[in-house]
Amino acid sequence: MLFGSGLSALLTLFGISAALVLLFIIGPLLAGAERPGRGWGGWLAYFGALGAGFMLIEVAVLQRFVLLLGHPVYSLTVTLFSLLLGTGLGSLISRRVPLERVRRVTVRALVAVALVAALAALGLARLVDLAIPWALAVRIVAAAAVLIPLGVLLGIGLPGGMRLLDKARPEIVAWGWGMNGAFSVVGATLAIFIAMNWGFSVAFWIGALTYLLAAATLSSRSN
């Protein structure tokens, strides 16, 4: 199963994505003529962890809610709408936090995401089984009620980190955006590969660990 044709295609896609990240993101940081000074590693690790962790959790949630909503189209529509609405609200909330409190609020939101992902790994499948007999409209409302608050938490990490980075190291803000986007691509492929081999609960656990890593990294950033 590990090296079947479908997984081989995923491994190939993952390899191509990782190689492009190394070539166009990491390479210029290490050898570019205008590369930033020292101290960028921790900051960019933070934004990379956010990108990968977000996709690990999103892919796992999307697949779990296929069972709840009964059709992939419903799952894609409701899940993406709810998460995007929630992340937009989270970004709005983050922008209104005073700068002196941004680090503390952002770290707490990241830890909360990790806790929610861990709870999802432990109990989301059981909750889905319990809700399957409900009417479709009720299941959609229930899904939105779960996903929008999760999206709010997910939406705080990136803008909060960017505000701190813009204050401490404004010359690498563009690199932060690039790292986040690059690892979102890599994380999406990795999430599917993990889920196909070890299940969506493992994807949730790894997503939780990734957000804890992001929280620890941000807590340690002083410049």
Image (cartoon, rainbow, N blue to C red):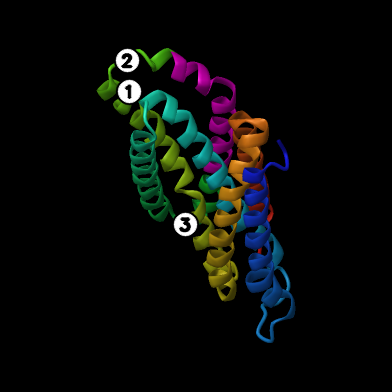
Identity of the amino acid at label 1? Arg
Q: What numbered label is drawn on residue 134?
A: 2
Residue linked to disc 1: 139
Q: Position of residue 162 (x, y in %)?
A: 51, 61
Q: Residue sitting at 33 percent across and 40 percent down? A: 77
Contact (Cβ within 8 Å) of mark 2 with mark 1: yes
Q: Position of residue 95 (x, y in %)?
A: 40, 55
Q: CA distance from mark 3 to mark 2?
A: 37 Å
**Left or right of residue 178: residue 2:** right
Identity of the amino acid at label 2? Trp
Q: Position of residue 50 (x, y in %)?
A: 57, 51
Of mark 3 and mark 1, the one earlier in the sequence is 1
Residue linked to disc 3: 159
Q: Residue sitting at 28 percent across and 22 percent down? A: 136
Name the mark nearer the viewer: 3 or 1: 1
Q: Is residue 149 above or below residue 29?
A: above
Q: Quadrant of residue 176?
A: bottom right
Q: Position of residue 47 (x, y in %)?
A: 59, 57
From the image, give the main secondary structure of the stretch colored magenta: helix
Q: Quadrant of residue 32?
A: bottom right
Identity of the amino acid at label 3? Pro
Disc 1, SS: helix
Q: Is residue 127 magenta?
A: yes
Which residues are drawn in magenta? 108-129
Quadrant in the picture for the N terminus: top right
Disc 3, SS: helix
Q: How many marks?
A: 3
Q: Quadrant of residue 131?
A: top left
Name the mark nearer the viewer: 3 or 2: 2
Q: How busy is the neighbourhood of tag 1: few (under 14 within 10 Å), some, or many (20 plus)?
A: some
